[in-house]
Image (tube, grey):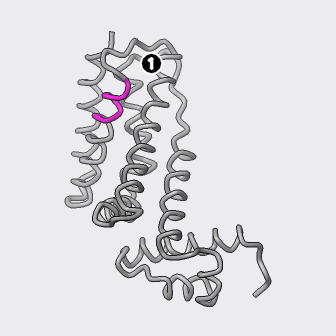
């Protein structure tokens, strides 16, 4: 295998860790299995990451960045507030809500991290801070387009939205009912639109 620079090798190891976690679960994502998946020695993993914690932090950061990159959404001109919010929720659902393995991994990561002393809670908080930031980005776009003024503080709307979308996605993991999930998202959009002025 050709020599790769450390950044390329780190990306390769992060991707290997994500593949294993998606396929086999977080508990089975060991350093040894990551090395095997990436086709490198254990020494290479330890050269790129000081410990499993550092690798886990890199996995979380990569997932967060991919979520931000995927969150590029352009509101249609002239849409009513309720239609704009519904379209944003459907866009979310297409990108992440209906991706079973990815959603399961994010929930596994949060549950795992809150049980760890370090880097646990801080990383779990970062996952949610990222989600709130994505929603706030939509809200800023919503206001710039002049669809309506927010009737509630942006931070509160962001937390409400993340709580709702995560709940819908978690229920969807259990029942796989796309129709009900979209019905809940549409209904929440109508409720949220009523708070706009």
Q: Position of residue 121 (x, y in %)?
A: 35, 56
- Position of residue 128 relative to residue 105, above or below, is above
Furthest-front residue in this view? 117
Q: Position of residue 155 (x, y in %)?
A: 36, 29
Q: Is residue 171 left or right of residue 116?
A: left
Q: Position of residue 74 (x, y in %)?
A: 54, 30
Placement of the N terminus among the 4 image quadrants:
bottom right
Q: Is residue 178 left or right of residue 35?
A: left
**To which quarter of the image does residue 11 belong?**
bottom right
- Counting the numbered discs, the total is 1
Q: Is residue 156 magenta?
A: yes
Q: Position of residue 6 (x, y in %)?
A: 72, 72
Q: Closest to the observer: 12 or 75?
A: 12
Q: Is residue 117 left or right of residue 30?
A: left
Furthest-top residue in this view? 197
**Which secondary structure lies at badge 1?**
loop
Placement of the C terminus among the 4 image quadrants:
top left
Q: Which residues are magenta?
A: 154-160
Q: Which residue is mark 1?
A: 79
Residue at the image position 34 percent from the left and 63 percent from the top: 113
Residue at the image position 29 percent from the left and 51 percent from the top: 169
Q: Residues within 10 Å of mark 1 (few under 14, many from 20)?
A: few
- Position of residue 133 relative to residue 94, above or below, is above
**To which quarter of the image does residue 114 belong?**
bottom left
């Amino acid at each position: 295998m050709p020599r790769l620079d450390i950044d390329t090798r780190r990306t390769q190891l992060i991707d290997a860790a994500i593949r294993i976690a998606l396929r086999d679960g977080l508990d089975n994502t060991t350093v040894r299995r990551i090395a095997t998946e990436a086709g490198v020695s254990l020494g290479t993993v330890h050269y790129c990451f000081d410990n499993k914690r550092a690798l886990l932090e890199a996995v979380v950061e990569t997932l967060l960045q991919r979520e931000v990159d995927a969150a590029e959404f352009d509101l249609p001109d002239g849409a009513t507030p309720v239609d704009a919010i519904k379209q944003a929720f459907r866009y979310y659902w297409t990108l992440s809500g209906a991706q079973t393995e990815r959603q399961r991994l994010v929930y596994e990561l949060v549950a795992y991290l809150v049980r760890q002393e370090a880097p646990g809670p801080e990383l779990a908080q970062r996952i949610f801070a990222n989600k709130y930031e994505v929603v706030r980005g939509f809200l800023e776009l919503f206001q710039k387009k002049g669809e309506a003024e927010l009737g509630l503080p942006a931070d509160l709307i962001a937390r409400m939205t993340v709580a709702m979308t995560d709940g819908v996605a978690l229920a969807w993991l259990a029942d796989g009912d796309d129709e009900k999930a979209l019905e809940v998202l549409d209904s929440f959009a109508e409720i949220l639109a009523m708070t706009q002025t």
